[in-house]
Amino acid sequence: MEKNIYTDDFELMLKERSDEFRMYPSKRVWHSIYNDLHPSRKWPSIAVSLLLITTLIITGYWNNNKHTTASSTNSVNSISALKNNFSTKIQQSIVKNSRKEIEPPSTSSTLIQPTPATKKFPDNETVNIKNTTTHPISSTDIAYIHTTKASKNSALHFEDNLSIDDVRKLQEPIPNLKALNSSNTVASVNKFSSKNKDALGNKSTDLTIANTKLAAENLSTIKELSGNESNITSLPVTLFSTEENNVNNINTFPSIKSNSVNENKKIEVATAQSTNQRIISIQDKAWIDNDAFYNKSKRKKWKDRATKEFYFTPSVSFRNFSNNSGFDAITNGSLTVPFSASSLNATLHQKPGIGFEAGIGWAYSLSKKLRLKVGIQANTTSYVIYGEETNHPVLTTLRLTNINTGFPYLDPRTATLANSGMNTVKIHNSTYQVSIPLGFSIKIAGADKLEWYAGASVQPTLVLFGKANLISDDRKNYVSDPSLIRRWNLNAGFETYIHYKFDGFTLQAGPQFRYQLLSTYANQYTINENLYNIGLKIGILKNF
Amino acid sequence: MTEELLLAGCLKNNAAAQEALYSRFSPRMLGVCYRFAKNREDAEDMLQEGFIKVFSQIHQYRNEGALEGWIRRIIVHTSINHLKKNKKFSDSLDIIHANSIHVNEEMIPSIMQAKQVVECIRMLPLGYRTVLNLYAIEGFPHKEIAAMLDIEESTSRSQYTRAKAMLEEILIRKKIIQKPRERSKLLASGTQG
């Protein structure tokens, strides 16, 4: 009793405490309920949101454009003039034996194709760098430039197609070499440059002079443009560092420091302080990017584009008769006038049969819309003709063509099936084939999970075996002769299907039309029979 | 605003009336959902689904019993469907295996007793918690619980017995309730004294 009282009390306590308990939902719950109950009222808020977003975008774009336009107008003139001037001078002052162009890499994120560390450029070589990508130079590029293995006396020549931003980046002082090569520092680079000067002899002297002159010219140009001398300084230019058989080619360009702003001519360049700060961050980032770039595990590109598929196609088989060349109207006295094979289509009592196709395939995407396909599949075709069994074998003839002479003749055969008015017996003609479909498919529409494709293929086919009941010349009997089935055939397939992607797999479904291009039977038989199948192809695909 | 006015407004799909109804009942209903759900987010999802059903089926309310009771039934059914839809039941083994389940009692915060009790209920495994909520708190009979959860009636009864025992143990350890023996001793000493 006590236990029962306790049990009742316990449950009562649970109920009371639970009923006392309150929790206050967040606002998004009511908003979701409201939007569900009043969907039409969502539109004003959506419209207002869109308006706000558009306004923000326009404002941001306008501000950004205004800011860069005014500064870049003059900086374009000054910096491009500097660049042209400087690069021309460098080129002229260095003895060039050959030029080696570095082609941009296939990936858009880097300017220069990474080369193995041991690669070296020959002496006295100018390395032209051009940016043929649509992307600006990345920090990886800059890092790579600075760690490019180059021989002494080589220089990096920057083509005119570099963008203003690229030039600016390259004009920044070099990263701290400590991160790139622990044996080098900025101070030791200066030492190297001195050593190099001696090693280079006149060349270095010329270079130095040229650079010095150029720096001076740049300085005067900048001063002229900015109108304020006191704020302009320049840094030393190209430095070369050499090590024995292991050269790090370091380049820098004049970095112009200016804090002055002319009312009409505003030059925007990096200040030394901010540049130094950025140097550290770019340098660290470049080192990290570089390391990650060289050490990352690369997925084979082809795997991203390749898929394998498993499919099957239940279908209905039809056939169509026509005359072949052996049916020409060359007759002799013993042959009757040949009948039209096409009339057989109407006169024979026949019915489509069930066919089936199953196979595996591999597809490779050439582009986003075009895929090439190859596979291997097994096919069965069949159709039903109606006849009647004869009580005893009947002598009849087949109209065949002499392969050597090309003339038709009547080949005597025996038959046990008749094409009579009763036609109560079902006679199956069938083939069992193996094909190799080669084709392509094109994406018509769709995105994300659902896509629509159309495709075509040719299918060299090997007919393994089959049943052939051939109509006799007088159309009264069926003669069974599987040896007349053509061993090698060719089919064409046309299909359209929907792709649905889920969980790493793709489901494919759609109609398929398969047409047999060559006759089922060998050329000896004067009647051509072309089979065609209409079915529903269902498949499942998966990436490699 | 009286319930009748709220009801009339909701029948006309009046947004203000709907919001008022929601504001009146949502705190308690969220508490109901919270007892079933794994976390607050799930509870709010259940509440949202439940109230959408309430407003869309408001015309079916026949004034038989309190409006709150009617809403609560919808919320409970929605919560159960939500759990079943997210396969929480099929993945949960506690319908079959009871003894090996360990409850982490350290997570229960120290707060008002109502919340303490609810949090203790939420510490139970999903199957125990659901049966206990439906039988002891919502008052559904075992037959109906068995139909809702696709289990046998006997399973519902046995699960409830085990759930209650486990909850009792948790509440005693947390000193939210006293042990039955201590309670009877106190009663006895009070009688004798």
Image (tube, rainbow, N blue to C red):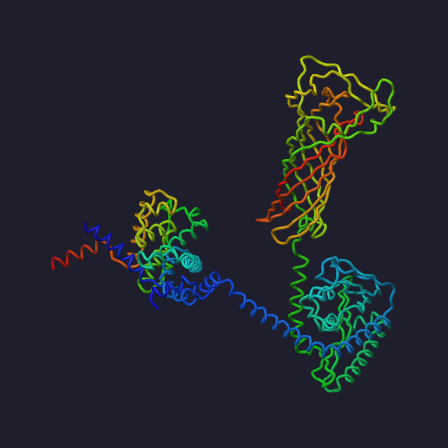
Instruction: Name the one closer to the observer, A322 or A173.
Output: A322
Tell me if A88 is positioned left or right of A396 in this view: right
Tell me if A208 is positioned left or right of B188 in this view: right
Instruction: Name the one closer to the observer, A428 or A20.
Output: A428
> Quick check: A345 above or below A256?
above
Tell me if A300 is positioned left or right of B130 in this view: right
> Which quarter of the figure has residue B155?
top left
Instruction: Name the one closer to the observer, A522 or A86.
Output: A522
Residue A429 point in image, percent of width and height = 68, 26
- Residue drawn at point x = 65 percent, y = 67 percent: A284
Residue at the extreme top: A392
Residue A251 point in image, percent of width and height = 76, 70
> Which quarter of the figure has residue A63?
bottom right
Tell me if A341 is positioned left or right of B140 in this view: right
> Which quarter of the figure has residue A62?
bottom right
Residue A173 point in image, percent of width and height = 72, 73
Q: Count the labels in the image.
A: 0
Residue A208 point in image, percent of width and height = 82, 75
Residue at the extreme front: A421
- Residue drawn at point x = 76 percent, y = 62 percent: A149
